[in-house]
Image: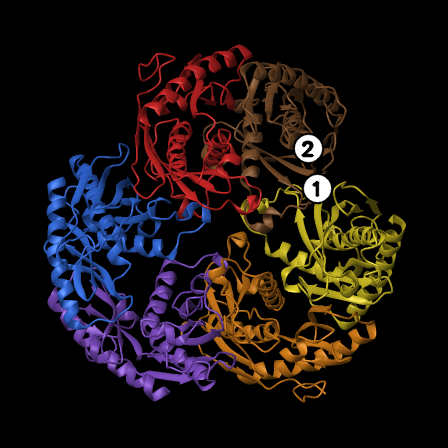
Chain colours: A blue, B purple, C orange, D yellow, E red, F brown
Amino acid sequence: MRPSGRKLSELRPISIETGVMKHAEGSCLIKVGETHVLCSASLEDRPPPFLKNTGLGWVTAEYGMLPRATNTRNRREAASGKQQGRTIEIQRLIGRALRAGVDRVALGERQITIDCDVIQADGGTRCAAITGGWVALRLAVNKLMKAGVVTTDPLLDHVAAVSCGIYAGQPVVDLDYAEDSEAGTDGNFIMTGAGRLIEVQMSAEGATFSRDQMTELLDLAEAGVAELVAAQKAAL
Amino acid sequence: MRPSGRKLSELRPISIETGVMKHAEGSCLIKVGETHVLCSASLEDRPPPFLKNTGLGWVTAEYGMLPRATNTRNRREAASGKQQGRTIEIQRLIGRALRAGVDRVALGERQITIDCDVIQADGGTRCAAITGGWVALRLAVNKLMKAGVVTTDPLLDHVAAVSCGIYAGQPVVDLDYAEDSEAGTDGNFIMTGAGRLIEVQMSAEGATFSRDQMTELLDLAEAGVAELVAAQKAAL
Amino acid sequence: MRPSGRKLSELRPISIETGVMKHAEGSCLIKVGETHVLCSASLEDRPPPFLKNTGLGWVTAEYGMLPRATNTRNRREAASGKQQGRTIEIQRLIGRALRAGVDRVALGERQITIDCDVIQADGGTRCAAITGGWVALRLAVNKLMKAGVVTTDPLLDHVAAVSCGIYAGQPVVDLDYAEDSEAGTDGNFIMTGAGRLIEVQMSAEGATFSRDQMTELLDLAEAGVAELVAAQKAAL
Amino acid sequence: MRPSGRKLSELRPISIETGVMKHAEGSCLIKVGETHVLCSASLEDRPPPFLKNTGLGWVTAEYGMLPRATNTRNRREAASGKQQGRTIEIQRLIGRALRAGVDRVALGERQITIDCDVIQADGGTRCAAITGGWVALRLAVNKLMKAGVVTTDPLLDHVAAVSCGIYAGQPVVDLDYAEDSEAGTDGNFIMTGAGRLIEVQMSAEGATFSRDQMTELLDLAEAGVAELVAAQKAAL
Amino acid sequence: MRPSGRKLSELRPISIETGVMKHAEGSCLIKVGETHVLCSASLEDRPPPFLKNTGLGWVTAEYGMLPRATNTRNRREAASGKQQGRTIEIQRLIGRALRAGVDRVALGERQITIDCDVIQADGGTRCAAITGGWVALRLAVNKLMKAGVVTTDPLLDHVAAVSCGIYAGQPVVDLDYAEDSEAGTDGNFIMTGAGRLIEVQMSAEGATFSRDQMTELLDLAEAGVAELVAAQKAAL
Amino acid sequence: MRPSGRKLSELRPISIETGVMKHAEGSCLIKVGETHVLCSASLEDRPPPFLKNTGLGWVTAEYGMLPRATNTRNRREAASGKQQGRTIEIQRLIGRALRAGVDRVALGERQITIDCDVIQADGGTRCAAITGGWVALRLAVNKLMKAGVVTTDPLLDHVAAVSCGIYAGQPVVDLDYAEDSEAGTDGNFIMTGAGRLIEVQMSAEGATFSRDQMTELLDLAEAGVAELVAAQKAAL
């Protein structure tokens, strides 16, 4: 019944390859089905200006998409001179999600920037970016700890994200583009490895939804995120 | 226990004054406690370019804040040459929420732009903008129907929004600035007059949250939105 | 003979309500007929960079108009990414006018920014902004003096402005939109409470004018500004 | 008593050389003392979009200054990505002034753009731009009339401009930079060949002024503009 | 003597993998040593506006670099709101180079955009982009010919590019970053499969160069481009 | 055979007038046929931030073109809000070329900005800008040496530039607009007074070129630059 033939609760195949960008302090290429995102972590030894002399660190994120990651070419944001609203919304979400899993005192006055660049898109790019971005972050933090500059692990738990939605009246997990563009309701759940909620964003695109449906989506999300966390562990 | 002395489930006083901008097809000044938002609806007799010849209408929104709506002056976005990420995120949310309550076939090929300008801010500006924006939209649509250019009511139901969050470990509704800046988790619920969900955005700012807490917040939101819808009805 | 039925030398009804924005150091809502402008004064305890270590203060102004302040909706300047030439010209004028009434040595190394946001427009918005802006400035300066941080009053005199023009061949004062859009010549006179000139801007829009007409317009302006100064005094 | 030794009513030497830009429909290099402005007129055979099918023509102006036209280098506006408020204000003034002398029905549906680029600045650049810009306009219109595409002369009269101000307590005409930077009040008068007023802009920079002083400045301006018009005639 | 131990005339290992972006009409990942560039070709069935009704096609290129493609993170151009001069210069070069190998009449009124995004940088990114970009272009054109919409092959010959320079006084080919940052003179040679010159850009960065050195560099470039063309052939 | 009747190796008449901008530390108006460029050198007593405390100086350049320097009016870059790719490419070239002739240690921690503004264009503006820009630079450096603040001459040699190309199958030097717009190949050679190469940029616009043609173009360039250097010497 799903265009891909998947079961309602079935994720697409996940692959996470680490160490793909030689200059970055941490990096991975995450593939969730045909959605491919390159994630890198860049470390700076000073915090952003607004955190100077607070003892706190910062994790932020930027998101981009190659012009031909999608079916028809999108205009390059660097050329058009501004990031689209969608891009800004997504990168704010990624940064917020990752920070929710960080002990900023333990990190200390430094900044880690996670760049998530979509090489190929087939739905769910922001979730893949969060899941892969956390892996890049983990690798960069490992480097800091190995070097002894950070002694308490600043990462409190895994952070991963999955999309859910109501497609053809049924709750489904990990929507691909074919589903995403037709879903009446869809959104994203970001959770920790322990299954605590970090962010819930569920939005009616064509049809409002009930509290019961909300509950079904949360069930799907819990199971989905657990699989993604397992994939993160396997990759590291 | 709340800084304002309110009960956990108590909204701030709500006032909605209509017809405050003589040029607009619909307008209101909504006050939710010390948060004041001026909302206007502007009608154009043609749809945006991407809907030409589709028979569908469009509702969109823009959001702004006067530089001194807040405790310290913010730089005017028109002067800095770009809207902040926060502004873009909010106005996309308002537009999406209002469109979820619109029958775009019944509206026909025309566009209604809802401008929400915050005159004074004390937390919850985006929820006030949605609740007040719907009133402006309703008034503009009434005008269209009275003029006979639209015959089926394109508004399917009321749309209203309330913030909820976890403050000092307790679930609370309609956070003011003092609470908002300290809440571990907060977000917004947008619902219809019939209590269906349009958008759920819940985000851990300092502490992750459990599914039980999510349920408590949804309960608060349902009751809060019902009060807001009653206020919309009273104002019209 | 005037569209509004006013006499040639008759101003529109003036109302100035103070203290309308709780966060601002000074604020008022000025209504000149159907032209409504919200004015606020924001104080910063340091001067702009170019005045550092000079002992001099600064007063500056910014001007904006809500998109639906006018008969048809104007594009939001924050969204279009730049302020229009008209906006820039007006806010430079407001700042220059208010500074002409300030003893910048007495003010000391601090800056006051006057924000003038047009809620509803019906001609003469820049004059209303100057007249109302001065009231907001006066209130903010009162606060500084009450706190004892400024001891000599930095405001030398009232500053107020009125438009004049030649409409249907006759000199008229305080043009509303209907007159403004048809006037052959129009402009603004900014004067002190003592009747000294601060700025004269008279411009032929459709027909050049003679020195005799210039004299008649100056006569109208003197009487008009005197009334506005009286309204400022009444409001304070 | 003036830094240059000039009498109160004495203009700087004026030179207007025509035909200095081979591609332009009309051009001149105007020198008013050490202020040198290159003016060109560019003709387009269609009006700006807002005048399509109205039968009316348009004259507009743009103003620029070479980075090293002044004593210290100014940042190039093309490099900084926006025109300064001062630039925008000046070019709007030039366009408005020149249009006041044009019969837009006689011009017909075409546009003439006057570019005024300051090669060297020593005060009074906007007045030199108007006076020289009119010469470039006259030459371009002559070409149109010679070609027979315009049969009634669209230029109603000469347009020229002179600055006046109060320097060291005395009314003076045609201020150079040394005077301009010290004047308590200064501004510009734009007039026709017949001595009718087009625009009066007089502004207190450091000291307010009286109606009597305003009268003295108008007297100086009348005489000054007459000399400039004579120079325009001599150049053509 | 070269940091990498290569001989003066020795290129780095070249790998060209085709078909790496499923949505694009043509794509490849080119690796020249540690320099990795993702190239895609996007086809539009209409030419750019300036070629409408001319019968001619167009090939253009855009260039980007992921923020962490380099040793230290570069600011994302989309976020800074403009492309750097270096980026603009490079993408103009790529487009010009590829067009030199295209029969624009045979291509017909359509446009092909080549996006070259540097995933990892180690010197010579613009040459890799041209060499890989031509492969993507070839694949897209093959698709057009297979579909029968283009009947005469619009690609006149291979186009490939190699950098050359004077490093430690010796002429070398295909500089990596270590050499590039120290070279006294360096530049790029773009040539056809038949060895004809398309573009020569040689520039003294620290030391001027003689005609004899120019000749030596041309010799190195001829041999280098021949190898690159062989790699293109092998990949297709 | 050339549109101008010139011989293949014949430059256009050259004139270099110095001291044309009274505020600049060095300036000239260079005319190469109908191409006229105003060049000024502006000295700042501190280096750009990236050279602070290195002991090195900097020479940079900016390029502009008056809107009506060309046959049809170009949009003013300051008004459009960004410099075109062509402008950026040219000013980077001018700066690079001039720096190649500068001993930056001898110059010391100061910056000289060369502004090249094209008053009238007829092909070869970037070459004229380099040749004239060097004269302005020479004059500014002379001033520094005369003042004794620089004691070793930081200018190593003359720098001048000439365009060459293949027009109607023949190699020609110093292309005017009529040739430039038709040439199959064209480009620029920048050389020192001693005939050493600084930059070679040769580009196929319509037809690729051979090594033999490259050699012929280099011969023409050597002779052409020698003439330009002689003109620089005569002007100083």
Q: Which chain hosts label 2?
A: F
| Chain for numbered disc 1 | F
In the rendered structure, find residue F71 and report the number of the disc placed on it: 1
Q: Are marks 1 and 2 in contact (CB under 8 Å)?
A: yes
User: Which quarter of the image is occupied by the C terminus of chain E?
Assistant: top left
Q: Which mark is residue F177?
A: 2
Give the amino acid at mark 2: Tyr
Q: Nearer the viewer, residue E196 or C229?
A: E196
Q: Position of residue D203 (x, y in %)?
A: 69, 64
For residue D214, which quarter of the picture?
bottom right
Residue extending farthest to the top is: E212
Q: At 44% from the left edge and 48% from the top edge, which residue is drawn?
A: E81
Establish if E204 lies above or below E149. above
What is the x, y in percent for residue E46?
48, 46
The image position of residue F185, as x and y in percent, is 59, 25
x, y percent for residue A155: 16, 48
* Residue C111 seen in the current view: yes
Could you tell me which secondary element the residue under label 2 belongs to? helix
Look at the numbered disc 1 and give the secondary structure of its residue: loop
Q: How many marks?
A: 2
Distance CA(mark 1)–CA(mark 2): 10 Å
Q: Is residue E22 left or right of residue B67?
A: left
Q: Give the amino acid type for the residue marked by disc 1 in the picture.
A: Asn
Give the mark nearest the N terminus, 1 or 2: 1
Image check: C158 left or right of B107? right
Q: Is residue B207 visible?
A: no
Is residue D148 shown above or below F84?
below
Residue F21 as seen in the image, left or right of residue F57: right
Check the image and report above or below for F139 versus A92: above
Query: Toward the viewer: A15 or B146?
Result: B146
Q: Residues within 10 Å of mark 2 (few under 14, many from 20)?
A: some
- Out of A28 and B13, give the one closest to the viewer: A28
